[in-house]
Amino acid sequence: MILALPGGIVEAEALWTVHDRWRYLWMLSDGRFLLRDGKNLEQGDATLEVKPFLRFPGPLIWLEMDPAQQFMVTESASRRRTTPAKQPAPRPRRPARKRRDRRRPTTRMGWSASCAGIPDR
């Protein structure tokens, strides 16, 4: 909700659903802002209208901007589960000592980082 001061008249109103407790709003200059919506980043204006800005392969982990708000650096993650490759049949060995099996199922995290300029209106 945007209120005109000192009268308190409502100038604009919007309702957004956030999906978690992470940061979802970054203020820019001239009444503009960035809004995180799942895997997307949207740019809004003083009338609270938003339009698509950036799309990420997975959840946005962090976002940083330079003080002049001309550049931003972001990081996002996407989970990809992998199964261990099938191992060839082991060759017969001498029973000298026992070895522990150190193979475990793995989860790979895919990371992406991007740097983008923030366009003026």
Image (cartoon, rainbow, N blue to C red):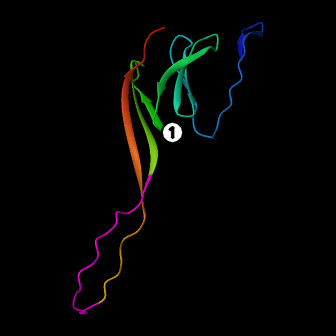
Residue at x 68% of width, y 31% of height: 17
Q: Left or right of 57: which side holds 45? A: right
Residue 15 vs residue 71, the one in the foreground:
15
Asked if residue 88 is among those painted magenta in the image, a careful observer would answer yes
**Bounds of the magenta segment:** 81-97
> Is the residue 7 above or below the residue 20 in the image?
above
Front one among 39 and 119: 39
Image quarter hosting the N terminus: top right
Depth check, front residue: 61 or 3 = 61
Residue 99 inside the magenta-drawn segment = no
Q: Nearer the viewer, residue 77 or 46?
A: 77
The residue sitting at 37% across, 63% down in the picture is: 84
The amino acid type found where label 1 is placed reads Pro
Q: Name the spot of residue 22 as percent of width and height, x first.
A: 58, 39
Q: Main secondary structure of the magenta part?
A: loop
* Residue 18 percent coordinates (x, y): 65, 34
Q: Which residue is mark 1?
A: 59
Q: How many labels, in total? A: 1
Tell me the SS state at disc 1: loop
**Location of residue 32 (image quadrant):** top right
Residue 105 place in picture, x, y as percent: 43, 65
